[in-house]
Image (spheres, helix red, strand yellow):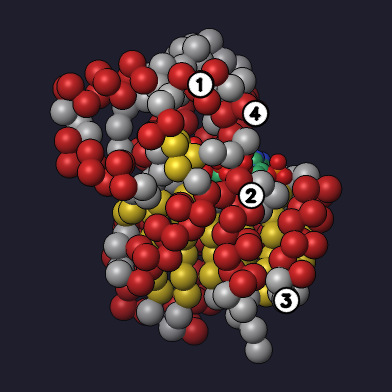
Amino acid sequence: MRPTALITGASSGIGKAFAKYYAEAGFDLVLVGRDIDQLTLVSEEVIAAGASCEICVADLSESDGVASVLGVCPEPDVVVANAGVTIAGRVGTREWADLEQMSYLLGVGVAQLLEGLVPAMTQRGSGDILIVSSIASLITMPNSAMYAASKSFVTAYGQSLAAETERFGIRVCVLCPGYVHTNLHERAGLAHLEKQVPGWMWISSDTVVQAGMKGLRRNKVVVVPGRVYRAVRPFMNSHAAQRLWRQLTKRH
Ligand SMILES: NC(=O)c1ccc[n+]([C@@H]2O[C@H](COP(=O)([O-])OP(=O)(O)OC[C@H]3O[C@@H](n4cnc5c(N)ncnc54)[C@H](OP(=O)(O)O)[C@@H]3O)[C@@H](O)[C@H]2O)c1
């Protein structure tokens, strides 16, 4: 029996990189997202790598969407909770409904998914959980307060989950990447960041995947991928670092 990896947000970016990684590692896959065409393209790639693959089209910004994923894949060996969007704008300038949906997708929806999946892992005595959070949960992010707050929710959730489930053989790794080359910023109308944020601050989706694997192997619960980010992490909350961060990453 091949093990199964459930990956949310698998139609592009970091989720797609996780899908390829797990297919090559001998897993069968359940790929979740909303865009069936993109999911089909990814599924063709992972099938070519030898995996069986099921597509689950679901909107994870709604409780019903998360419930449908739990129905399709109730007992995966690995779960990568990765799906996400970002919304930028000063506090009070964006539609509350949009912020609420994003917050559900990034925060409570991830908890709903894991609350549904962890009991089977606990009973089995094994399971790997990767939560793709963000560096926004570790540093202030003006003009993206709800995004930062939602990511802080999953970082905190993952840390407590790890402490609670370690004795049942479950490994939890919360990834907190900085800037990753994906579709995320362009989709959010933040394409300017690709030119504005210096090249050395960008990492690839594969770097995020490798950091996650290393984190799981070494039992590191909160992992900041990328050499530069790791080097500055101890100083990240200093006044000077925060000022430089805001200048380099200013969101319009
Ligand atoms: N890129 C970065 O710089 C960066 C930095 C830190 C953290 N992150 C986090 O990394 C994760 C992956 O993002 P990415 O950078 O790889 O961006 P991406 O290329 O835009 O991928 C986002 C994925 O999430 C899925 N998704 C979005 N809304 C969804 C919804 N309502 N229901 C189900 N799936 C949904 C998308 O699929 P569909 O379009 O098919 O729905 C897509 O597969 C996110 O949680 C993001 O916050 C990214």
Q: Any atom of ligand 1 within 8 Å of the CB at mark 1?
A: no
The numbered disc on residue 50 is 3
| Callout 1–callout 2 Cβ contact below 8 Å | no
Residue 108 vertical placement versus 1 (above, below): above
Label 4, label 1: how far apart the Cα atoms are: 15 Å
Q: Which residue is mark 1?
A: 195
Instruction: Tell me the quarter of the picture where residue 187 sits.
Output: top right
Write down the residue under mark 2.
9
Measured Cα–Cα span from mark 3 to mark 2: 21 Å
Q: Gap in Å between the C-alphas at discs 4 and 3?
A: 31 Å
Amino acid residing under circle 1: Lys
Q: Nearer the viewer, mark 3 or mark 2?
A: 3
Report whether 11 appears left or right of 204. Answer: right
Mark 4, ligand 1, within 8 Å: the answer is yes
Which numbered disc, 4 or 1, marks the residue that appears first in the sequence?
4
Mark 4 vs mark 3: which is more N-terminal? Answer: 3
Q: Mark 3: which secondary structure?
A: loop
Q: Quadrant of residue 140?
A: top left
| Figure quarter occupied by ligand 1 | top right
Residue 40 placed where, x, y %? 81, 55
Identify residue type, mark 3. Gly
Rate crowding at label 3 as few (under 14), some (14 to 19) or many (20 or more) other CA atoms within 10 Å. some
Q: Residues within 10 Å of mark 1 (few under 14, many from 20)?
A: few
Which numbered disc covers residue 170? Answer: none
Q: Is residue 84 visible?
A: no
| Residue bearing mark 4 | 187
Determine the CA span between mark 1 and mark 2: 25 Å
State the residue at coordinates (63%, 54%): 16
Amino acid type at circle 4 is Arg
Q: Nearer the viewer, mark 4 or mark 3?
A: 3
